[in-house]
Image: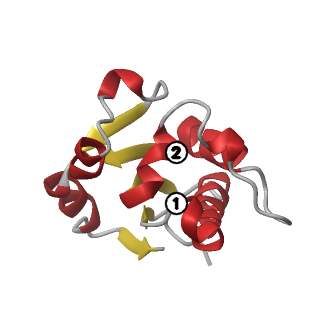
Amino acid sequence: MDIAPRSLIIKCTAGAEDAERCAQAFTVAATATASGAAVSLWLTGDAAWFGLPGRAEHFVLPHSAPLAQLRDAVLELGTLTVCTQCAQRRAITADQLLPGVRIAGSATFVDEILRPDAQALVY
């Protein structure tokens, strides 16, 4: 039985303060991209910092794939977005982000999750 590819929209609401939840979101996103799913990973709250150069490289969680490696897999095959309000609260600007990372707001998020082929997950 062939299963049609689906869009997977993942919202990561945790940063280094909740390392396991954060790593889980990145792991699922990277695994889904490798499986051929269209993936959109949203970084909200303190996860927004991982849209900046060098931040994921300093994240360490034992027995987890390096966060920078997972992030790069998503960037290569999917979409990585930092929440507009979360960026503003942290004084993060678009020109500071890694190449390929975008800033977008709730209207874009809602548009993505309301697509008929979409599945949304929140970590």
The residue tagged with tag 1: helix, strand or loop? loop
Please say if 51 is above or below 47.
above
Please tell me which residue is depicted at 27% across the width and 58% down the height of the picture. Answer: 112
Disc 2 residue type (three-letter)? Phe
Does residue 64 appear in this view? yes
Label 2 crowd (10 A; few <14 / some 14-19 / many >=20): many
Q: Which mark is residue 50?
A: 2
Location of mark 1 (residue): 15
How far across and down, in percent of the image, does residue 116 sit? Answer: 27, 70
Disc 1 residue type (three-letter)? Gly
Label 1 crowd (10 A; few <14 / some 14-19 / many >=20): many
How far across and down, in percent of the image, does residue 7 sit? Answer: 42, 61
Relative to the observer, which residue lies in front, 42 or 53?
Answer: 53
Q: Which mark is residue 29?
A: none
Q: Residue furthest left?
A: 107
- The reply, left or right, for residue 108 in relation to residue 17 is left
Q: Earlier in the sequence, mark 1 or mark 2?
A: 1
Quadrant occupied by the N terminus: bottom right
Please tell me which residue is depicted at 20% across the width and 52% down the height of the picture. Answer: 108
Please say if 101 is above or below 43.
above
Please say if 80 is above or below 102.
below
Please tell me which residue is depicted at 27% across the width and 66% down the height of the picture. Answer: 113
The residue tagged with tag 2: helix, strand or loop? helix
How far across and down, in percent of the image, does residue 52 sit? Answer: 49, 34
Does the residue at mark 1 contact the one at mark 2 (Cβ under 8 Å)?
yes
Q: Residue furthest bottom?
A: 1
Relative to the observer, which residue lies in front, 38 or 24?
Answer: 24
- Residue 6 in which image quadrant: bottom left
Q: CA distance from mark 1 to mark 2?
A: 8 Å
Does residue 40 appear in this view? no
